[in-house]
Image: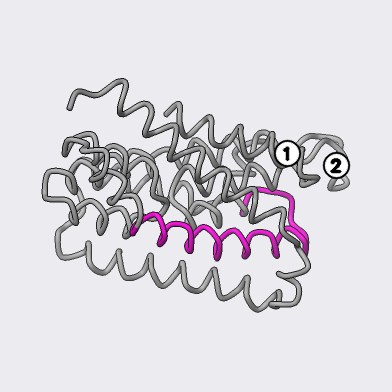
Amino acid sequence: MACVLSTVLVGVGLARRLGLSPAQGFLSGGATAICGASAALAIAAVLPRGREQDRFTLLVVVAVTALSTVAMLVYPLIAHALQLSPGQAGVFLGGSIHDVAQVVAAGYLLGSETGDTATLVKLFRVALLALVVVAAATAFRPAAGDHGSDARPGLLKLVPWFLWLFMLLVLLQSVHALPPAALPVVSEVSRDCLVVAIAALGIKTSFQALFQTGWRPFVLLLVETLWLAVALLVAVLIGLPR
């Protein structure tokens, strides 16, 4: 929890230093801290919209996926080199790699115990998505009068419908209310929705527009990724027995 929060705060703070907006720092930090591309799209849905923001969101999706793939290959080597126990390695991998699939691959590469622990830690991070999206909606919701109204939009209206659906599905799955036969279908639909969302962003931008964003977003995401990994590694080495 502390590593997730600190990564978002580092993103916001570093974005200011790099001349980017706090919203962009929150978006990149949240994507790094929670679950990569999925988190980026969820957070972007409650942030102020615009062509520049759409380009930045797509860049975050591409970059965070690439960084997660690199982490999947490199982090298990780090865990092995430091002779981390299966529990320590699982917490490190599950807490620092961005996407769920890469966490599972990296964890089970080091054994079933490490894989189980990494998956559990990663699912806890994913469960924090709702809190991060609500925080983004609260922090960046329009001020009164921005949409021709004297009243500031209520939080319930700013939280997108898919977040309520996400929380409902988490609750149903937690109490084993979903039939096992429905899980593959729901999983396939979720992947299809993610592909459609990324494709929609791609239609609205171009490689030229992405390159025009410059080097700063890449530095921002790289620093956030390294911060999360180092913070997790230090916490694991200090706080967990071998």
* 22 to the left or right of 183: right
Which numbered circle lies on residue 199? Answer: none
| Region rendered in magenta | 45-73
For badge 2, the amino acid type reads Ser
Can you say which quadrant of the picture contains the N terminus?
top left
Expressed as whole percent of the image width and height from the top left, the position of residue 241 reads 19, 23
The residue indicated by pointer 1 is 153
Secondary structure of residue under mark 2: loop
* 145 to the left or right of 12: right
Which numbered circle lies on residue 149? Answer: 2
User: Which residue of the protein is positioned furthest toward the front in this rendering?
Assistant: 81
Q: What residue lies at 60% left-to-right and 74% top-to-bottom?
A: 200
* 156 to the left or right of 52: left
Expressed as whole percent of the image width and height from the top left, the position of residue 48 reads 74, 50
Depth check, front residue: 189 or 214? 214
Q: What residue lies at 47% left-to-right and 34% top-to-bottom?
A: 4
For badge 1, the amino acid type reads Pro
Considering the whole magenta stretch, tell me its main secondary structure: helix
* 236 to the left or right of 165: left
Secondary structure of residue under mark 1: loop
User: Which residue of the protein is positioned furthest toward the top in this rendering?
Assistant: 239
Above or below 134: residue 190: below
